[in-house]
Image: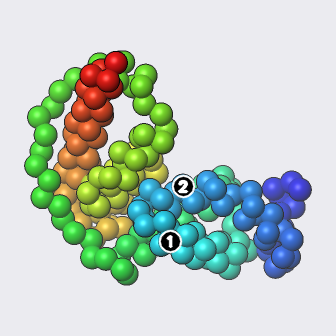
Amino acid sequence: MHLNDIIKGCQKYDKKAQFELVKRYSERLRSTCNLYVIDKTSAKDVLQESFMIIFSKIESYSDKGSFEGWMRMITVRCALAWIKKHKRFTKTDEAICKPFVLAPKVYDSLHTKDIIDFIQNLPEAQRLVFSLFVIEGYSHTEISKQLGIKEATSRSHLLRARKLLQKRILLTDIKIDRAV
């Protein structure tokens, strides 16, 4: 089934088209949910909520821009709403790590799953800002509005997240070198 047919079918509340949309995009959108909501059960709830909103708002989708990007934006907003509803957005007081240079061989030993695990294990505030800025492409102004923080705080969380990721990747590389 072609994507335009699926969209038109969903706009007419066709169950087959809705099923096809879920089947086609659930894994990609689940990955988005998992970046923001660590608990797998809660991430599934966010995914389900996202699809409910997608189906209710699909009539407003115009052919301008990427349909997947439109769905991803809804999913990110659902994840952020879940975080605000179930947890208070907390400012973490993570110590800033010393900057250092990563050797290129570090990156050779990393897999996508490793990188996702590193991101998911960041403190919540840093994980949210990092994901919104680096993965979703939001500006610090947009992030500050979404999370209700100052732009400077957003920049600070991003810097801390990057430094903490570098530190953890470097430590992983040291463990790999010692194991060899």
Residue 78 rendering spot, x and y as whole percentages: 49, 72
Residue 127, percent from left and from top? 33, 55
**For residue 176, side relative to residue 35 (left or right):** left
Quarter of the rendering occupied by the C terminus: top left
Residue annotated with mark 1: 41
Q: In the drawing, does residue 19 fall left or right of residue 90? A: right
- What amino acid is at disc 1? Thr
Task: Tell me the SS state at disc 1.
Answer: helix
Is 42 located above or below residue 137 in the figure?
below
> In the image, is residue 118 above or below residue 1?
above
Residue at image position (54%, 65%) is 75
Asked if marks 2 and 1 touch (Cβ < 8 Å), the reply is: no
Observer-nearest residue: 93 or 61? 93
Mark 1 or mark 2, which is nearer the start of the sequence?
2
* Label number found at residue 31: 2
User: Image quadrant of residue 28?
Assistant: bottom right
In this rendering, position of residue 167 left or right of residue 111: left
Count neighbours of disc 2 (C-alpha within 10 A) and say few if under 14, some if 14 to 19, many if 20 or more: some
Residue visible at 27% across and 76% down?
88
Question: Residue at coordinates 47% horizontally, 72% vertically from top-left?
Answer: 42
